[in-house]
Amino acid sequence: MIRRILALFDPFIGALLATVVLASVLPARGGFVPVVDIAADAGIVLLFFLHGAKLSREAIIQGLANWRLHLTVLAATFVMFPLLGLGFAAVPGLPVALASGLLFLTLLPSTVQSSIAFTSIARGNVAAAVCTASFSNLLGIFLTPVLAVLLMGGSQVELSFDSVTKIVLQLLLPFLVGHALRPLIGAFVTKHKWILSKVDRGSILLVVYAAFGAAVVEGLWSEVSWTDLAIVLACCSVLLAVVLALTWWAGKLVGFSYEDQVVLLFAGSKKSLASGVPIAGVLFAPAEVGAILLPLMLFHQLQLIACAIIAKRLSARPDVGGNPAAA
């Protein structure tokens, strides 16, 4: 039993927690700060470049035919989630930064790797999962900052010319360049998926270290208590449960096949840590980013555990495989 429980935890979470501890004990100071910032920015640029090279143009063309599914997933990601986020961010007693972090996580795009992996395990429409998760991430580069400005207010985040320039140069341009070079490097990236995985996780750890280090220097842990963290964890748990229920029943209501219901369930209920970390670094002041990312980190682990359990249960059902009423 213990072995099965431990199997649900991604080793990356341990590295993430270790990075937070390191940043809390030994935050970047003085001349080391610009070195860490440059390394984190370089990692983000390389990450989005490789994501662009990985995205198959053929998959995009094939996926456009299933536009009803894609629009439903996008509505769950960028409409339903933010509406729920407004309610959870209003929980009384939370520090402003943590409440903002709860709202911010609901504005992010879906994940790519885990959405595809869990869809595959549950015997869903993998091709559609690839397309819809990729669309979500690409649109998130634009939609997340816009939604943050509209819903979080100018006092917390302001989409200035400098921030727009940073989004274009760090996120969008590397993604487009990588996709344009896919005919040359796409086969290499696909064959060596471990490279993308290492860059993905390494860049996140670098940005988290830089963000939490700056927040710790500004007194993060004197402002956030264990009670605050417990409340945020409870909010993330309830939020995830509500979204999982709504996306599953929405798929039935719309009349999707079982395979497409699975895509909506997994792609529509997730939020991307890989996209959230760099976007938060662009939109928020360095001293605020650490606290802003705390709810996202908690939600990230919860969604992996919950979706791993659900995917395994769906895959084990004998009636799964084209039956809309399955599961």
Image (tube, rainbow, N blue to C red):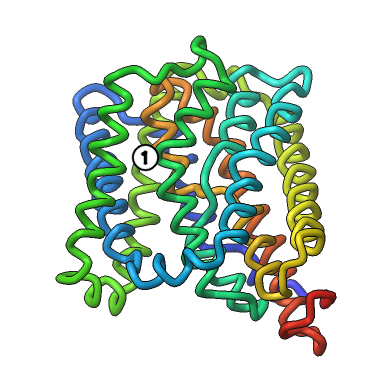
Report the front residue among 111 and 13.
Answer: 111
Per the image, the residue denoted by label 1 is 207
Residue positioned 39% across, 23% down in the render: 286
Residue 267 at x, y = what percent? 60, 59
**In the image, is residue 24 above or below residue 64?**
above
The reply to whether residue 264 is in sight is: yes
Query: Mark 1 Cα within 10 Å, few/some/many (few <14, many 20+)?
Result: many
Residue 120: x, y in percent? Answer: 58, 77
Image height check: is 300 above or below 23? below
Of residue 67 and residue 237, the one placed in the foreground of this image is 67
Q: Residue 83's x, y, as percent? A: 70, 33
Q: Residue at x 62, y 17 (%)?
A: 96
* Tag 1: amino acid: Val
Q: Residue at x 20, y 34 (%)?
A: 35
The extreme left residue here reads: 184
Residue 200 at x, y percent in the picture: 37, 56
Quarter of the figure with residue 40: top left
- Which quadrant of the rendered structure holds the C terminus? bottom right
Residue 301: tell me if it is visible. no
Q: Is residue 252 above or below residue 164?
A: below
